[in-house]
Image: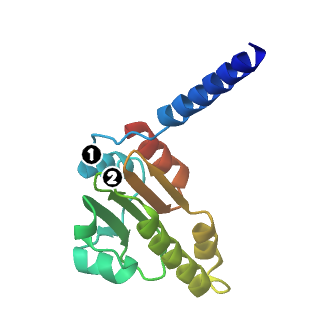
């Protein structure tokens, strides 16, 4: 009898853990890329930044728009200014691994490029923000990362 009781308790514990893991799975937001990008850019200074076209996104980040539900990317027109905001909406059931890998590669390249001779820009690159939430990827190099991240989190 005691043996069955122990097995019963073990099964219940496994079931509770399994239910806990399933309930923690991230839900995908029904927000559009336009809504999310508008919420983020409304909270920060985007003066001197320009929304990048598909060819520039491919050149800068090695990402193609067809691979995702959408990409919003703004960066400074000044090549000595590292501030940029990238928001990607993933396709349904798509993982973010490839995009995050390419973003991190770009970030490391820029950090190497600016290290040593542009201390303000280098500091901004070290204080970047990269987050995935609800089917979106958010990447920001900006002097107001926290405000942009807060807006991103709030809308989702």
Disc marking residue 15: none
What is the x, y in percent for residue 148?
46, 50
Extreme top residue here? 1
Q: Residue at x 29, y 63 (%)?
A: 71
Q: Nearer the viewer, residue 100 or 93?
A: 93
User: Which residue has dot 1 on it?
Assistant: 35
Q: Is residue 152 above or below residue 90?
A: above
Q: Is residue 68 left or right of residue 134?
A: left
Along the horizontal axis of the image, is 39 left or right of 80?
left
Residue at the right extreme of this rendering:
2
Q: Is residue 1 visible?
A: yes
Which residue sits at x=58%, y=74%?
Answer: 121
Q: Where, by quadrant of the figure, is residue 27 drawn?
A: top left
- Residue 10 position in % (x across, y down): 68, 26
Instruction: State which quarter of the image contains the N terminus.
Output: top right
Residue 48 is at least partly visible in this image: no
Vertical order, 58 against 134 (above or below): below
Q: Which image quadrant for residue 51?
A: bottom left
Q: Quadrant of the C terminus?
A: top left
Label 1 CA crowd tier, 10 Å (few <14, some 14–19, many 20+): few
| On screen, residue 60 above or below 86 | below
Label 1: element kind: helix
Left or right side of 18 for 38 = left
- Which of the labelled discs sits on residue 93, or is there none? 2
Q: State how far apart marks 2 and 1 are (Cα).
A: 21 Å
Earlier residue among tags 2 and 1: 1
Q: Position of residue 73 (x, y in %)?
A: 33, 66
Secondary structure, mark 2, is loop
For this orientation, the residue located farthest to the front is: 1
Q: Residue at x 28, y 72 (%)?
A: 52
Pointers 2 and 1 in contact (CB under 8 A)?
no
């Amino acid at each position: 009898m005691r043996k069955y009781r122990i097995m019963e308790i073990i099964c219940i514990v496994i079931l509770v853990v399994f239910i806990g893991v399933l309930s923690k799975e991230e839900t995908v937001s029904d927000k559009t890329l336009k809504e999310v990008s508008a919420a983020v850019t409304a909270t920060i200074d985007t003066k001197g930044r320009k929304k990048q076209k598909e060819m520039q996104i491919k050149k800068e980040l090695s990402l193609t728009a067809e691979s995702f539900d959408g990409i919003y990317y703004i960066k400074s027109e000044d090549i000595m200014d590292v501030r940029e905001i990238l928001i990607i909406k993933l396709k349904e059931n798509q993982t973010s691994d490839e995009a995050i890998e390419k973003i991190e590669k770009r970030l490391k390249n820029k950090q190497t490029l600016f290290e040593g001779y542009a201390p303000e820009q280098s500091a901004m690159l070290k204080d970047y923000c990269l987050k995935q939430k609800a089917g979106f990827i958010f990447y920001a190099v900006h002097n107001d990362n926290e405000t942009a991240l807060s807006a991103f989190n709030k809308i989702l």
